[in-house]
Every structure is written in C-alpha cells, then in structure tokens.
Image (spheres, rainbow, N blue to C red):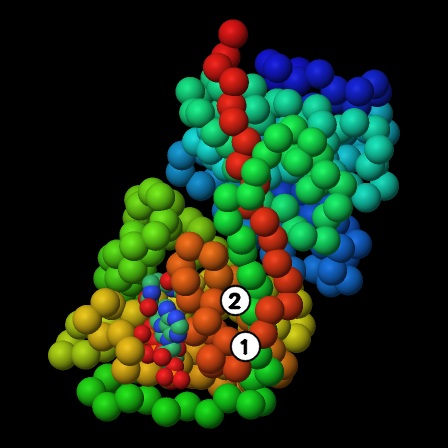
Amino acid sequence: MAPHLVLPEPFTARPATTADVPAVHALVGAVERELLGRTETGADGIEASLTRPGLDAAVDSLVVHAPDGQLTAWAWINRGRRAQIDVAPAFRGHGIGSALLDWTEARAAEVGTDWLAQNVDDKDRAGTELLRSRGYEVLAKNWQLEMPVAEVSVELPEGFTVRPFQPDEARAAYQLIEDAFDEWQPRRKSYEEWARLSIERASFAPALSPVAFAGGELVGAALCLDLPDPDDGYVEQVAVRKDQRGRGLARALLAIAARGFRAQGKHNLTLWTHSDTGALAMYERLGMSVRRSTTVYRGRVRAAG
Ligand SMILES: CC(C)(COP(=O)(O)OP(=O)(O)OC[C@H]1O[C@@H](n2cnc3c(N)ncnc32)[C@H](O)[C@@H]1OP(=O)(O)O)[C@@H](O)C(=O)NCCC(=O)NCCS
C-alpha cells in the first residue's frame, strides 16, 4: 500500500500504470454518464494525465480495486499542487474518496507545497461537500461552452492566411500558446508537457486545427481534438498573439474549426475556459453558451510530520 493511505476494508491500492488506462477510462466514463449523461473524456486524455512529464505515476497515482478485481477509484496528483479523484458510482459511500483525499494531501505535504487544488464538477454534490468540509475554498471556475456548428459563418480578417496545423509547426504553436497563456497561468509548461497534453494525443486532429499566419509568422491557433462524443467537436486550446488581437482572428479560427467539425457530422463546437483568462465574455459574444461548469477548490497543506 502507498504511504499515507488508509483505505477502508476490503479495498486495496497500487500505483496506476498505462496498462490501467482502459479500466480507468471506463470508470471515468461511468462517472461522467452519471453526472452529465454522456462520456466526454477520451482514453488518450487519461493516458496523457498519467504520462505527463512532472508526474511520476509510481508515486503520484493510485488505482483502488475491490477484492474481485473491479476498479473502484483512481487518483493522481501533479507536482504536489493539482489532484484529481474519481470514485466509481457503484462504490460511493465506502470512504474511498476521503481516503484518497487524505493521500493527495499527504503526498502534497511530502512534495513540500503549501496548498493543493482539485477541480470538481458543480453537479458533483458529494465531491463538493467533501472538499468544503475539509475547509477547501474556491480558487477559480472553469466553464465548458458550446455553440451549434450550423450557425457559424467564416470571415477571415484581412492580412492573415489560415491553413491546417502541420507537424513542423509544433514548436511555433507551443511558443505562441504558452506565451498567450503565460498572461494568467501560474506555471509555464515545458514543450514536452504541452505536447503530451495536446498534439501528441491520439485524438489530436491536425486537419481540423486551423493555424493563422501574418507576415510568415504563426500568430494564431485553434488546436482541436476528436473526442468520443459523437456530437461534439472540441477545441483544446485557442490563442492569438498579443499584437494581433482584437481583429477578429479568434472568431475566424473558431469558425473554421466549427466548419471542419460540421463536415465530419458533429453538431456542436465545445471548449473549456478558465475564469482567470477573462475570455468567457468573448466566447459569449461569439454566440457560445455555458453547458457545464467546474470549481477549482484549494486547500491548505499541513507540513509533513
Ligand atoms: C482570447 C483570445 C484568443 C482572443 O483573440 P482575438 O483574436 O483578440 O479575438 P477576436 O478579435 O476574434 O474577438 C472576438 C470577439 O470577442 C471580443 N473579445 C475579445 N477578447 C475579449 C475579452 N477578453 N473580453 C470580452 N470580449 C472579448 C471581441 O471584441 C470580439 O467581439 P466582436 O466581434 O463582437 O467585436 C486572445 O485574447 C488570447 O490569445 N488570449 C490569451 C489566451 C487565452 O486566454 N485563450 C483562451 C482561453 S480558453
């Protein structure tokens, strides 16, 4: 058993490996179907979480099994700062979630951080209640927005050319996106970490990911994933270089992405935005509306003793 983990009987835990990805994906799918009525997460997203540089699955992840081998829960913690816990609907009420929360806090203390954040769906009453009962406070919000692809028309502002993402543009896209997100995200990702979570994923759809150029330089991108939901086309990241903003480029990139997904038979364009970006108002101006929201809770980590 992992250090600092006290699981209720008769469950057992061990670190996750990539061999667990299909079972974890099934568990996360069951959680999403219960909360949302559909599966949003792809298996490649689970694999990306477990293999991202900076997270050592041998000490930063756990899978919890019932005696008959059923997967009942999983958890991970990244750099002692961000944790995720999912308990299968059929195994709620046994205290597995509390035990995993204790483990994430102990692991954070071991890493030496002073606070720990968890992102919880606003419909997840039990998860929200558990964090609040431990004194966690709201740090930020995430909103998932959607827009019917049928309603989108493309108007490319003058001075830009747009075409699908090419693999040799990966470094330039990384630079553009991390520069843009640096304006609000607390930590810049390495190229390897960014790539693992975006363009190296099996669901990354380069042909559906428009990139924009001005004067031969890459100045805008909308990187898209082809996720399991048959209705939704998903934008993983959208960014426009600072000196090119306010000219309608993000609007055009999202419209081009929507057109591509429409041709694939999808009905909606969806994306997530974080409250710290200040971009919610922009998406609403583009005709998108909030479909789902999550809250990032932050709790104090007690020093390891
Ligand atoms: C968000 C971002 C992609 C917008 O790019 P942009 O090319 O300047 O956007 P557009 O010019 O296409 O603007 C589209 C519409 O949204 C509006 N808009 C743009 N930014 C806005 C903001 N922060 N708040 C409110 N409205 C905004 C524009 O006025 C425009 O509306 P209009 O056509 O009715 O006038 C860009 O600011 C960026 O890269 N930011 C950093 C990265 C980021 O936060 N990405 C999104 C997070 S999920």
Q: Position of residue 103 (x, y in %)?
A: 61, 23
Residue for point 62% across, 15% down: 4
Q: Answer left or right for 175 relative to 210.
A: left
- The residue carrying mark 2 is 271
Q: Nearer the viewer, residue 94 or 137?
A: 137
Disc 1 marks which amino acid? Met
Q: CA distance from mark 1 to mark 2?
A: 10 Å
Residue under the point 75% across and 28% down: 96
Under 8 Å from ligand 1: the CB of mark 2? yes
Q: Residue at x 66, y 36 (%)?
A: 132
Camera-nearest residue between 146 and 237: 146
Q: Secondary structure at mark 1?
A: loop
Residue 226 in view in this figure: no
Whichever of labels 1 and 2 marks the residue nearer the N terminus, that label is 2
Q: Residue at x 29, y 52 (%)?
A: 182
The answer to the question of whether label 1 and label 2 lie on touching residues, with beta carbons closer than 8 A, is yes
- Where residue 217 appears, as percent x and y from the top left, is 17, 72
Q: Is residue 87 left or right of residue 152?
A: right
The disc labelled 2 sits on which kind of residue?
Answer: Leu
Figure check: 88 above or below 226: above
Q: Quadrant of the N terminus?
A: top right
